Image (cartoon, helix red, strand yellow):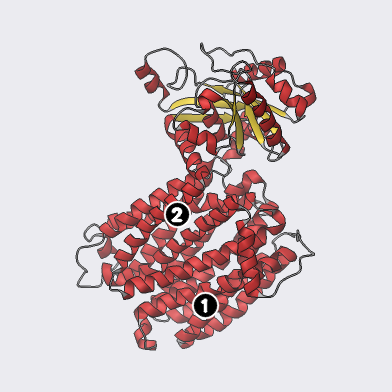
Amino acid sequence: MKAAMENNKAAGQFELLKQKRFLPFFITQFLGALNDNIFKNALIILIAFQGAELIEGDADLLINAAAALFILPFFLFSATAGQWIDKYEKSKSIRFIKLLEIVIMLIAAFAFIQGYIYLLIALLFFMGAQSTFFGPAKYSYIPQHLKVAELVEGNALVQMGTFVAILVGTIMGGVLIAEEQGRHYVAFCIVLFAIFGYLSSRFVPLTPSLNKDLKINWNVFSETVRNIQFLKTNRTVFLSVLGISWFWFLGATYLVQLPNYTKTILGGNEQVVTLLLAVFTIGIGAGSLLCSWLSGKKIEIGLVPLGSIGLTVFGIDLYFSQPETVATTVLGVTEFLTTDNNIRLVIDIVMTGFFGGLYIVPLMALVQQRSNAEHLSRVIAGNNIINALLMVLSAIVAIVVLSSGFSIAQLFLFVAVLNALVAIYIYTLVPEFLMRFLVWLLIHSVYHVRTKGLDNVPEEGPMLLVCNHVSFVDALIIAGCIRRPVRFVMYYKIYNLPILNFIFRTAKTISIAGKYENETLLNKAFDDIDDALTAGDVVCIFPEGKLTADGEMNSFRDGVERIINRQAVPVVPMALQGLWGSAFSRQKSNILYRLFKGFKSSIGLVVGEPIEARDVSAAMLQEKVCILHSDTL
């Protein structure tokens, strides 16, 4: 019965959307993103296809200038916004921001009706300023109302909702502006959705300030510098922010250039532009949503390298899938989809977005988890500053590349190759990403892992995990399933295995030896365990002290009692099932049979309830693990 309840809970992908702590907030941010994209896409298509009738000027230059103007406030005001959101109650701040949106959209409605393109471009700056303040409120709200185990799901839903809003807004903006009275339709919609956004914000629950005594520094420039310096104090968070910002560099390049790419290279009309923007955002939304399922309700940063690989592969193929010649007539959606190999091009755009979703969600959740809650809004603000800088850089790079005589398709190829170089650089700086990717591949390709009782591992605080020892990859299986980072205590000969040693070192594994092999290393291991538990880490040991040679559990040694005597922390028993006989175990059967048996074999990890330190003994833990080992999944 308990297992069934856990499975139902895990299956509740959209459960948060039924809860008051999340739903009003989700609707509010969804409507904001929807409105932004109706406005922006309508304006871009207006400039690209009708601009010659309303103004004089180069369409490429105006579109890139408009993109830069929208993101400039993120660079200028994010530092102030982060302080403001940290200092004041967030639901009240969100309502005030949504009121400003109504004012901006009323002016924008007037400008659309009158055809004042330059005024619309100027209003992009104020829209960007409004979004600058909403960003820190949005991402600092999430961890205040969601548990750690819900962070990936919450961020996945927000990212999915954001890109569904982009999709719907893109379609609406493109379809409406192409109508005979399109400017009037757009004007009506942006005001209506701004009002609805404010009404939904009134139901966002109270979210108290965690730093009421914060004194705001109104000097934008000094606070911006201080914000960046503050970000650098946490290396993993800072490099994650750089990764997020790089995603927005790529996203801005694709989203801004697709309209003119469609018109000048693909020969498509406004509806084809809308189609390509739509499938790109569908891809991102699908990747974001699938990320929650692939992560197993934990922050799985191993998906980030997978996202990078996909972004590069499909970004490069996007260049090679372009038509050899531009159509002599303007193509509608039907003609476009039946011309040359345009289906391949559409697939490239969808998959580029899909892998972007896999890439961005874990990074955002990681920033929220590893940042101090009292400073999270300022961390998000610092993130927005760097995001804005990279998006401005995207516009500059696009202008320089296109002005130098290169095509938009060549620009796409350039940024796809550049993405591979940036990814390699970041993963050499933070090998934890690559390590988690290798672990993720192991438990999603070689093995099919079933779990039970993962919720028995508390979300925070020091604890000791104990488990039976069956194979050389036990630690990798456990690391891939437990939702918190785990530090393993491992026999030094396994620790020193080629290739695996990279993973173990990156995961801060503690190497240990027997008393008669290397007593110095043994004592150092116990000191390292003590330090890790003092720091609040999760430590995992294999009390048998060696791999099983016959599939039966060896006797638990008393090292676990020595650890508990030094640090009285809770102990969580676990049992691995189904690994005996795999290629990584010590079974002496035919190696080809073992390799075949190991591929996609079903294994299990059963986690028991925590045991208080005062009740712990080696014999009792062995009995508990034996019971878990015989449990059915």
Residue plotted at (42% across, 23% down): 598
Q: In the rendered view, would you say 471 is above or below 124?
A: above
Q: Residue at x 50, y 30 (%)?
A: 449
Inspect this view and state whether residue 24 appears.
Answer: no
**What is the secondary structure assignment of the residue under circle 2?**
helix
Q: Nearer the viewer, residue 190 or 37?
A: 37
Looking at the rendered image, the quarter that the C terminus falls into is: top right
Residue 417, how many percent across, how many down? 35, 56
Mark 2 → mark 1, Cα distance in angstroms:
25 Å
Q: Is residue 19 depicted above or below 556 in this figure?
A: below
Along the horizontal axis of the image, is 489 left or right of 339? right
The disc labelled 2 sits on which kind of residue? Gly
User: Front-most of 40 and 1?
Assistant: 40
Residue matched to label 2 = 356
Q: Amino acid at mark 1?
A: Leu
Q: Residues within 10 Å of mark 2 (few under 14, many from 20)?
A: many
Residue at position x 56%, y 54% from top?
Answer: 364
Residue 200 % position (x, y): 65, 65
Q: Which residue is mark 1?
A: 124
